[in-house]
């Protein structure tokens, strides 16, 4: 398996990290059980400048990882049902930022279902995530992101983010996905 992504990968503009996460491999190696999946859909959340971001109103105990060091996980419970994982990504001097993992293609440790990780809650369930995983260091814990060949620009789609309230940023093309992947949660809106 490829090398773990270095911390410097995450300490860049959030939108650049979001785009570059496509094709990378999320790995959970816990107690001899290995799970791996290729990231095929993400959404960027730009912190204090983005009304859809959990960081928009400032730091809280729940969103504290978003204000911490890049390269950590921010896991939250959505609608009291789904655990969703974000990757803390922000350039130096920026207070907060994260990239939501929306969809992945199973590689190892999953049932043979190409749609099994097609959605942020399914990614969370598939990797056994809970809020106890929030703050994990993606460079040195049992949950890592591994390098992989980049996805060519011609295979990358962009659209507005899914399921967010209308705001000054809701129409921005901050969702990135791999065209034609069965691991993408849903097709972009027309």
Image (cartoon, rainbow, N blue to C red):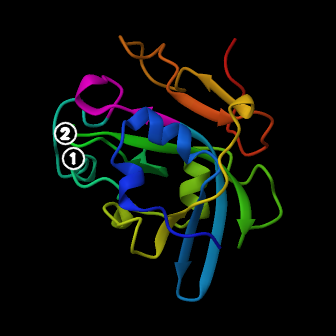
Along the line of sight, the residue nearer the viewer: 89 or 51 = 89
Residue 155 is situated, as x and y percent measured from the top left of the image, at: 74, 33
Q: Is residue 16 left or right of residue 177?
A: left
Is residue 45 located in the magenta-colored stretch of the structure? yes
Residue 149 is situated, as x and y percent measured from the top left of the image, at: 67, 53
> Compared with residue 40, is residue 49 higher up or lower down, i.e. above or below?
above
The residue at the point 65 percent across, 35 percent down is 177
Give the magenta part as a residue range: 43-53
The residue at the point 57 percent across, 68 percent down is 27
| Disc 2 packing (10 Å; few <14; some 14–19; many ≥20) | some
Separation of disc 1 and disc 2 at Cα? Answer: 6 Å
Q: Is residue 72 left or right of residue 185?
A: left
Tell me which corner region of the image, top left, top right, bottom left or bottom right, holds residue 137: bottom left
The residue at the point 50 percent across, 68 percent down is 4
Residue 95, numbered circle = 2
Q: Where the N terminus falls, by quadrant?
A: bottom right
Residue 71 is situated, as x and y percent measured from the top left of the image, at: 36, 57
Residue 120 is situated, as x and y percent measured from the top left of the image, at: 56, 46
| Disc 1 packing (10 Å; few <14; some 14–19; many ≥20) | many
Helix, strand or loop at label 1? It is helix
> Compared with residue 188, is residue 139 higher up or lower down, i.e. above or below?
below
Along the line of sight, the residue nearer the viewer: 91 or 136 = 91
> Compared with residue 101, is residue 55 higher up or lower down, i.e. above or below?
above
- Note whether residue 74 is visible: no
Disc 1 to disc 2: CB gap under 8 Å: yes
> Compared with residue 145, is residue 158 higher up or lower down, i.e. above or below?
above
Along the line of sight, the residue nearer the viewer: 114 or 81 = 114
- Note whether residue 118 is visible: yes
Q: Is residue 172 left or right of residue 92?
A: right
Q: Which residue is mark 1?
A: 67
* Sequence-first tag of 1 and 2: 1
């Amino acid at each position: 398996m490829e090398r773990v992504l270095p911390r410097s990968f995450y300490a860049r503009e959030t939108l650049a990290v979001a785009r570059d996460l496509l094709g990378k491999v999320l790995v959970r190696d816990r107690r001899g059980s290995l799970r791996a999946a290729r990231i095929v859909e993400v959404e960027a959340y730009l912190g204090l400048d983005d009304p859809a971001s959990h960081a928009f109103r400032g730091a809280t105990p729940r969103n504290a990882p978003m204000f911490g060091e890049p390269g950590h996980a921010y896991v939250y419970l959505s609608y009291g049902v789904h655990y969703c994982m974000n990757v803390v990504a922000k350039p130096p001097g920026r207070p907060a930022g994260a990239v939501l993992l929306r969809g992945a293609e199973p590689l190892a440790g999953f049932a043979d279902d190409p749609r099994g990780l097609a959605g942020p809650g399914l990614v969370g369930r598939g990797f056994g995530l809970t809020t106890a995983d929030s703050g994990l260091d993606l460079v040195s814990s049992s949950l890592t992101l591994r390098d992989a060949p980049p996805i060519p620009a011609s295979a990358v789609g962009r659209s507005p983010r899914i399921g967010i309230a209308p705001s000054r940023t809701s129409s921005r093309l901050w969702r990135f996905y791999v065209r034609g992947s069965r691991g993408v949660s849903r097709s972009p809106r027309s």
